[in-house]
Image: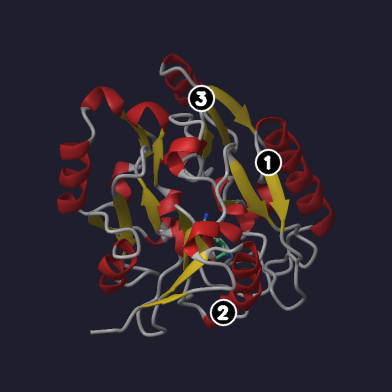
Amino acid sequence: MASSSIVTPHQSSACTPHYNRPTFLMCPPEWYGVDYVINPWMAGNINRSSRDLAFAQWKGIHNVLRGIADVRLLHPEPGCPDMVFLGHGALVQHGVAAIASFHPAERRAETQHLRRWLEEQGFLLWSTPRETAFEGEGDVTFNNDGSKLWAGHGVRTCRSAHRHIAAAWHVPVTSLHLVDPRFYHLDTCFTPLSGGFLLYYPAAFDPASLSAIEAEYPTEKRIPVTEEDAIRMACCALNIGKTVFTGELSRELGLRLFNSGFDVVQLELSEFIRGGGGAKSLTLRLSDMAVTHGLATQ
Ligand code: ARG
């Protein structure tokens, strides 16, 4: 079996960072571009994204986010055009950061920069062996209160990485099989929301995975999206307390979220959608799920 390791940085675990407010890390799109094709969204978009427009859109999300959360910044690095999608670099909870082991070679150079930043902040780092790809929040997500994990496989993250990641926090994990190449990361089709709701695109999963989802989330808590909304990256939504940041939505989905008690902030994300990402993928959550979802203040 692949070996796992916790790397203890300079500080002891008693000094791992703890955030009392929703806190995220973002990386400006200084070197952003669709420079290669590693997902179906990028095909046909090589060199077609505008860096100026991407910057304007990134600033839009950064500004609104700063209104309700703390936002830290990671320095963008040349040669890492996808580094803006920081959510795939790690998964963080309780001062432990499980570091991604990217499947595509094109994204592997990003890891060292994020790893260094997390180490300097005092996070305990949980490393994944190179042979078992794991793409951070892109494919693995905690449920609303942080008591269990959902993990995607089939395209990027290896199924055999799931238990290894769950071991970092000693929590149960349910594996979900992704079957539509357009929804290659779990965060493109599945996002647990506060209040025990779930935003998801059912056709992205195989029948066994759908049954597992339905067994966990009662009908009134499930918010299924149509294909039309799914291809606007509606599921790749960033949820903080009762606020949901996402791209453009249909009127029906906006209403459904509103009626479930959410304030929806719709953002212009066209340049990032060309690269295959939505709102959530532009951030890495640093605060615990419970703090981020407004279940705890300390
Ligand atoms: N180009 C990036 C990649 O393919 C985009 C990632 C955005 N993904 C997402 N899960 N929303 O790795």
Q: Which residue corresponds to mark 3?
A: 242
Q: In the drawing, does residue 100 fall left or right of residue 19?
A: left
Number of residues whose C-alpha sits closer than 10 Å to that of mark 3, classed few (under 14), some (14–19) or many (20 or more): some
Q: Which residue corresponds to mark 1?
A: 70
How many marks are shown on the rendered structure? 3
Indicate which disc, 2 or 3, sits on the residue closer to the N terminus. Answer: 2
As measured in the structure, the alpha-carbon distance from the residue carrying label 2 to the one carrying label 1 is 27 Å
Q: Quadrant of the N terminus?
A: bottom left
| Residue 155 place in picture, x, y as percent | 37, 68
Label 1: element kind: strand
| Residue 284 place in picture, x, y as percent | 57, 54
User: Residue pushed farthest top?
Assistant: 259
Indicate which disc, 3 or 1, sits on the residue closer to the N terminus. Answer: 1
**Ligand 1 occupies quarter:** bottom right
User: At 44% across and 42% down in the image, what residue appears?
Assistant: 289
Q: Are marks 2 and 3 in contact (CB under 8 Å)?
A: no
User: At 71% across and 33% down in the image, what residue appears?
Assistant: 64
Q: Is residue 160 above or below residue 215?
A: below
Label 2: element kind: loop
Number of residues whose C-alpha sits closer than 10 Å to that of mark 2, classed few (under 14), some (14–19) or many (20 or more): some
User: Residue 230: which quarter of the image?
Assistant: top left
Which label belongs to residue 109?
none
User: At 81% across and 46% down in the image, what residue appears?
Assistant: 56
Mark 2 is on which residue type? Arg
Q: In the drawing, does residue 45 fall left or right of residue 6?
A: right
User: Residue 217: which quarter of the image?
Assistant: top left
Q: Which residue corresponds to mark 2?
A: 108
Nearest to viewer (mark 3 / mark 1): 1
Indicate which disc, 2 or 1, sits on the residue closer to the N terminus. Answer: 1
